[in-house]
Image (cartoon, rainbow, N blue to C red):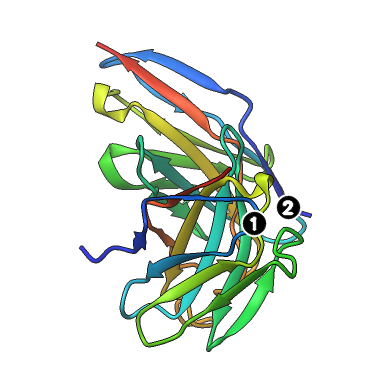
Amino acid sequence: AQSVAQPEDQVNVAEGNPLTVKCTYSVSGNPYLFWYVQYPNRGLQFLLKYITGDNLVKGSYGFEAEFNKSQTSFHLKKPSALVSDSALYFCAVRTGISGNTPLVFGKGTRLSVIA
Amino acid sequence: EPEVTQTPSHQVTQMGQEVILRCVPISNHLYFYWYRQILGQKVEFLVSFYNNEISEKSEIFDDQFSVERPDGSNFTLKIRSTKLEDSAMYFCASSRDRGLTYSNQPQHFGDGTRLSIL
């Protein structure tokens, strides 16, 4: 069965500093990896995905993520954090390429960017 | 940008009562999903729906749950006899995926319905 691990419950970073939110996965087939962000009282908002191709994928709001097959990781990164990036971040995986394959989420990492 | 909309934003219900959560997916999307998030826990898949039938469901989605697409726009989740442990945030999502052609299009989520069972 597929699973996602986000080892950090909380990440604190100063505004302007680079940020990394960690994610590792375990799947039996090819992984299709996603990052979502959740702001207070809102739903999950898609940030970026890795399907195939370049290991570094770029997404919304200046975020990027690096797929590392040997380490089974898909860490989310941003070169310069903003206070407005403070939110709950979820890594997710699906192994099926058809639309009915559900997303399996990690438990989430709360990012706090301090001014 | 089109959005998934969910109503109500908060539903309070007595234990044992039936509840219906409503969702309007993005209009050209073909796959529909329900997830839930118990307070402080991870987001969990409940069910996916395509072509007017359930595609996949988790073990959480037992006989107390049902889904329906009563018309061309709404997608509902019904809990027949609510239990205290059904208290959670319920998210609806939709995607354009249709087999291999649009594989792995992201799922777009609504803002959720907070269900509180008393």
Give the vertical position of A37 relative to B86 (above or below).
above
**Quadrant occupied by the N terminus of chain B:** bottom left
Q: What is the total number of numbered labels drawn onto the structure image?
A: 2
**Residue wearing tag 2:** A2
Give the vertical position of A44 relative to A73 (above or below).
below
- Residue B2 visible in the snapshot: yes
Q: Label 2 marks which chain's residue? A: A
- Residue B17, given in percent of the width and then of the height, sits at 60, 60
Residue at 46% in and 62% down:
B92
Q: Label 1 marks which chain's residue? A: B
Tell which residue pokes out farthest to the left in this image.
B1
Kindly identify the amino acid type of the residue bearing the numbered disc 1.
Thr
Q: Dividing the picture into quarters, in which one does residue B52 lie?
A: bottom right
**Quadrant occupied by the C terminus of chain B:** top right
- Residue B77, given in percent of the width and then of the height, sits at 53, 68
Helix, strand or loop under label 2: loop
In the image, B117 versus A31, the foreground residue is: B117
Left or right relative to A101: residue A115:
left
In the image, A70 versus B22, the foreground residue is: B22
Left or right relative to A47: residue B51:
right
Kindly identify the amino acid type of the residue bearing the numbered disc 2.
Gln
- Residue A28, given in percent of the width and then of the height, sits at 77, 57
Left or right relative to A38: residue B51:
right
Left or right relative to A32: residue B109:
left
